[in-house]
Amino acid sequence: MAGIIQSLLDTDLYKFTMLQVVLHQFPQTHSVYLFRCRNTKDTVYPLREIKDELDAELDHLCQLKFTEQELNYLRGLRFIKSDFVDYLELFQLKRRFIETSVDEQGELVIRIEGPMVQAMFFEIFVLAIVNELYFSRLNVEEALIEGEKRLQAKAKQIADYATQQKIGDTPFLVADFGTRRRYSLAWQRHVIQTLRTAAPNVIRGTSNVYLAMQLGLAPIGTMAHEFLQAFQALNVKLRDFQKAALEAWVQEYRGDLGIALTDVVGMDAFLRDFDLYFAKLFDGLRHDSGDPYVWGDKAHQHYKNLKIDSRTKMLTFSDGLNLEKAWQLYQYFKDRFQVSFGIGTNFTNDMGQTPLNIVLKLVECNGQSVAKISDSPGKTMTDNDTFLAYLRQVFQIETATEQDNQHIEDQVIGQPNSTQVIH
């Protein structure tokens, strides 16, 4: 029986773009990733109940290899290098690097540990599998009826927005970013096709490489938090980890894939490192936490201070969006920036059921803790309070509020000094 994941292309583009840099520049890096469901109290049944099915799906996943057609497609992307495709021709995920269990609190635990060139590639597959297994036990027929109703409303909404654009305006661009939390692959495909038919000049792409290939869309993505976090544990000063990560990206892609992620240690700390050199080399910035209006205004002021015309730069928003929020942001920023939007759960899992808020995050690299200090209160992530305090000090970031600290205490995974995920 075919598994939920039918192709190793059925993941987000940034997994390939990050993997290529890791393979070329720090291939021996060792990493640890941990799974977390952030809304366990909202689940219809405990995720531990899908453990046996999940194990079977992981067995299947680790049998997959890239097909000749898929490799040829990747070779056709100008930023993918031929030696990387040669590596992918031999690539296969190894089952020994991923383990599932149930902890003392009865929660599903998924731990990935191994070479980063292997471990990082599991993430999107695992999250998509968990989602599809979970929702397949609920009322599928009812969900599809409600989902279709909501999808048709989105199609009308996006078509209306398309007609409201004025001549001379920067285009309103929206992409599907919903692979990791989708209802199913079939539903994700249906959503993309429906919305693209409704507004072909708005829906320009998807982060999902498999669907991009099948539907003739642009695959979209650059980097995720794990890429920058890894540099906290590589051979650079901690204060310089963002600059080292951005420089590694520039050296690898030399002008391609120029959207930089800003919120690993917060926008203010990012902008202190994003000097004239990087501001000229990168095409724009991606927002993934904090107030998007405040963030965009800071970006505008930063470009202005550097005497760069912000209208030549792209802002990409990807944090908890729906079409209405995207349109409002577009109206606010369109005269100052090119603007694009990545919409995830609201596209691919808006079925009238409570979506799972699940993540699989890098928590350790080369035996050292790594951390993300988000612009959103309660979204910080660490496995070591001492390291987190040091990271805050190095980047001049205010200490977490008492409320955030309570979140930390409430969200501990496992024993003291184990990974803490807060959201």
Image (spheres, grey):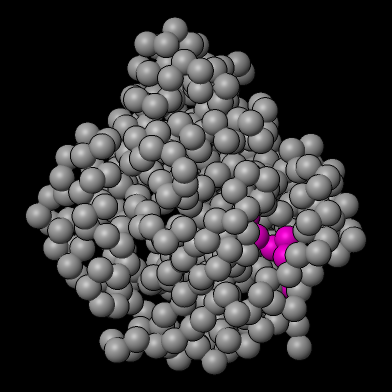
Q: Image check: 151 left or right of 206?
A: left
Can residue 324 be seen by looking at this rendering? Answer: no
Can residue 101 be seen by looking at this rendering? Answer: yes
From the image, give the main secondary structure of the stretch colored magenta: loop
Q: Position of residue 181 (x, y in %)?
A: 51, 65
Q: Image check: 165 left or right of 400?
A: right
Q: Quadrant of the N terminus?
A: bottom right
| 161 vs 190, nearest the viewer | 190
| 349 vs 61, nearest the viewer | 61
Q: Position of residue 420 (x, y in %)?
A: 29, 65
Magenta extent: 6-13
Q: Exactly how many numbered labels are in the figure?
A: 0
Q: Position of residue 397 (x, y in %)?
A: 22, 38
Q: Would you identify the image quadrant in which residue 306 lies?
A: top left
Residue 12 in the magenta stretch? The answer is yes
| 19 vs 148, nearest the viewer | 19
Which residue is found at the position 59% from the left and 36% from the top? Answer: 249
Q: Quadrant of the C terminus?
A: bottom left
* Placement of 309 over or under 188, stated as above or below: above
Q: Image check: 347 left or right of 46?
A: right
